[in-house]
Image: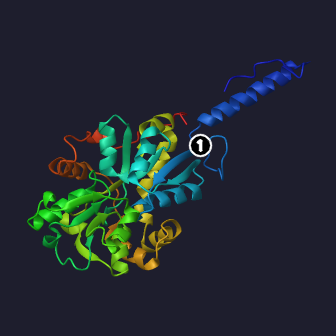
Amino acid sequence: MQPLAGTEIGGVPMKKKRWLSGLLAAAMIFCAGCSPKAAGTKATGPKSGSRTAIIGYLPITHALPVFEMKKQLEHRHSGVRVRLQKFSSWTDLMDALGAGRIDGASVLVELAMSAKNKGIDLRAVALGHRDGNVLVAANGIKNARQLKGKTIAIPSTQSSHYILVREALRRAGLKMTDVKLTQLSPAEMPSALAGGAIDAYCVAEPYGAVVVAKHFGHVLAASDALWPDAICCAFVLRGDFIDAHSRAAQRIAATYRRTGAALNAREAAALSDQYLNQERSVLKQSLKWIDYSDLTLTRKDYAVLSWKMTAAGIARRTPAYDDFVYAPKEGNNSCSD
C-alpha cells in the first residue's frame, strides 16, 4: 500500500496534523497485512486478505479428503476459501487444470505426472487414498481367465486401473492383447456392464460397489491383492497458484494432509451422502474397501508407482520426486498472498 498521495480531499486543503494521522493509520494497516497473524484467520466469509482456491473433482469416494479439507478450512476461519467444481470426466478436468481454469484437483496421479512431463507445472500435495479399487465383472464371468476376448473398461490408459487390470490378467496367464480395452468415464461403467456393452471394468469408487450392491456383477480382484497399498488418485495444486499465493497454498496443503485422521467411517459416510449422490448401500460397500489413514506420498511409494508406470508402458520416464511432490517451506511468512 502507498502513503496517501494528495493533500486535498474534495478540493479542501488538509491540515498537517490530520495528514500525519492518516499516514500513520495507512502504515499500521500495511504492517498488519504482513504480520504472521494477519491472514484472515478470523474471517467468516469473503474479505480483504482472504484467498479463494478453485478445486476440481469427480464425484468419487477418492475425492473425500478434498471435501473434508474444504470443511476444515471453513470451520477454522482460515482465511482460505475452497470453491469446488465438479467434472464428469478426467479429460474435462485435466483440460481445465492444464488451462489454469482451476487451481488444483483430485486427479488420477498418472495423469498429473504425464501433464508434468508435458510442461504443466502440477505439484502433488498428498494422496487421495490407498487401495479402494476393484476389478468387477458380469456375474457370468467367474474368474480372470474367462476375460479372454472380453471387453474391459477403464477410465484412462494412464491410470492405476490400467496397471491393476494388467496385473490381474498376468496372474491369469493373459496379456492385454487378449482382451478388448475401452475407456469410459466412471459414471458410465455400471450401466454399460448392466446393459452388456462391456464385460468387466476397473474404476474409482463408488462405481465398482454399484454392481456389487445391485447384484448385477461381482468382484474378480481387489487392488490390495494385486498391488498392496495401491496408489490411484492424488490432490495436486498448480505451481503458479503455489508461487503466487504461498501462504494460502501452505494452509491448503497442511489441512489436506490432516484429513485422513478425520475421515472415520461416520465422517466419510456423511461427506459421501452430501457430495456423491449414491444410494447408502453402495456407499457403505465402497467405504469398506478404501483407506484414508495415511495420505503421504513417500519416496518409496513414488518409486514403486514410477516403476509400475514404465513397466506397463504408461510412461517412458516420470518426473523426479522433488519436482513433483509439493514440500512447503516451513516458516514462510511472506505476503505473497
Quadrant (top left/top right/bottom left/bottom right) for the C terminus: top right
Residue 275 placed where, x, y %?
Answer: 51, 65
127, above or below 221, in the image: above
322, above or below 287, in the image: above
According to the image, label 1 marks what residue? 39
Residue 55 placed where, x, y %?
Answer: 49, 50
Which residue occupies 26% across, 69% down?
Answer: 200
Which residue occupies 46% across, 72% down?
Answer: 278
- How crowded pointer 1 is (Cα within 10 Å; few <14, some 14-19, many 20+) is rated as many
Q: Is residue 288 visible?
A: no
Instruction: Determine the residue located farthest toward the left in the rendered image.
Output: 173
Residue 209 placed where, x, y %?
Answer: 35, 73
Q: Quadrant of residue 6?
A: top right
In depth, the one of 185 and 167 nearer the eye is 185
Quadrant (top left/top right/bottom left/bottom right) for the N terminus: top right
Instruction: Determine the residue located farthest toward the right in the rendered image.
Output: 12
